Image (cartoon, rainbow, N blue to C red):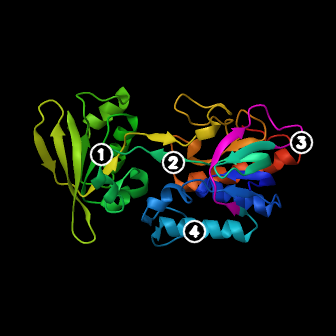
Amino acid sequence: MPEIHHTDLLVVGAGPAGYTAAIYAARASLKPILVTGMQPGGQLTITTDVENYPGFATPVQGPWLMEQMRAQAEHVGTRLIYDLIVQADLKKGPGPDGYFRLVGDSGDEFRARTVVIATGAQARWLGLESEKRLQRGGVSACATCDGFFYRGKTVAVIGGGNTAVEEALYLTHHADKVHLIHRRDSLRAERILQERLFSNPKIEVHWNKAVEEVLGSGEPEVVCGIALKDTQTGAPSKLDVDGVFVAIGHTPNTGPFLHEVACDSDGYILTESGGTETSVKGVFAAGDIQDRIFRQAVTAAGTGCMAALEAERYLSGIPAMTKT
């Protein structure tokens, strides 16, 4: 039989933003419920070495870090429910009873006085079996996260938009050589970014090339190259690289919230400048679901903290903090 759960604060999503929001809410005695979604831990569950999260002198494993956040959230009083929100009634505000209503895939109903949406975003992948197999062996979707591991090495960036060019430029601070692979003969990136790209001696652009396979070797298997195909002639070629960065965009996991709160044209939830409140009072968004720029675990955690603090103030009837 489906159940009805009541809470002062419902957190939707179990990544750094969601866990942090839950920790702060629990410490404020809001007795939060956290609905984990399909991938508890978020993108860090497919990340091996995390070397840039504050507090750790040596690299830690992404899944381990998420497990520690989960344990801390439960320790301070968060109730975790392994379910997936499939329906949300938010845009009209709370019902006559003062609660927002959300429904899980299980059929359970969640009634919350405030909601923090922290469902994150998923990197878009090429869809290759070899790409998936090597995601812990040299294939990444985040240069800022993993670029440090390629100091003095050769890497490839796949894509032709702003993200790809920015990733390629960033990687030149670490790698000796950066190959940018683009399936067309011109880039979609902003002109100023293209100028920086073309003037950087470490970067070589490969036009009209599509990745057919990511090549691996060794035990455990790691990236050793990529197999390419010319999109005009069909001619095959190969590049020897130590790492592959897929930079063809991200898809926000907006799901049932897309038409319940204001979103941009790509589906990212819009929040108040300098804060986390959405277009609906009492509903907040944190992490990659509202951050299309930084997409880091530490920034996600920061906005999770902000969302919980803003939710607490909302419940206390205190006006929103003045933004400057």
Q: Which residue is mark 1?
A: 157
| Identity, as a three-letter code, of the amino acid under mark 1 | Val
Say if 191 sits above or below 17 in the image: above
Q: Nearer the viewer, mark 2 or mark 3?
A: 3
Q: Which residue is mark 4?
A: 67
Picture residue at 82% right of the left edge, 38% below the top: 94
Q: Name the spot of residue 146 as percent of width and height, x first.
A: 39, 57
Q: Secondary structure at mark 2?
A: loop
| Identity, as a three-letter code, of the amino acid under mark 4 | Glu
Question: In what quadrant of the picture does the C terminus appear?
Answer: top right
Report the Cα–Cα distance between label 4 and label 1: 31 Å
Q: Residue furthest front?
A: 1
Report the Cα–Cα distance between label 1 and label 2: 18 Å
Q: Residues within 10 Å of mark 3 (few under 14, many from 20)?
A: few
Say if 217 sits above or below 214 in the image: below
Chain-order first, disc 3 or disc 4: 4
Q: Secondary structure at mark 1?
A: strand
Depth check: give the residue in front, 253 or 163: 253
Report the Cα–Cα distance between label 4 and label 2: 20 Å
Residue 3: tell me if it is visible. yes
Picture residue at 27% right of the left edge, 55% below the top: 130
Q: Name the spot of residue 13 as percent of width and height, x first.
A: 62, 52
Q: Are marks 3 and 1 in contact (CB under 8 Å)?
A: no
The kind of secondary structure the magenta stretch mainly shows is: loop
Q: Secondary structure at mark 4?
A: helix
Q: Which residue is mark 2?
A: 295
Residue 275: tell me if it is visible. no
Report the Cα–Cα distance between label 3 and label 1: 52 Å
Question: In what quadrant of the picture does the N terminus appear?
Answer: bottom right
Is residue 100 one of those drawn in magenta?
Answer: no
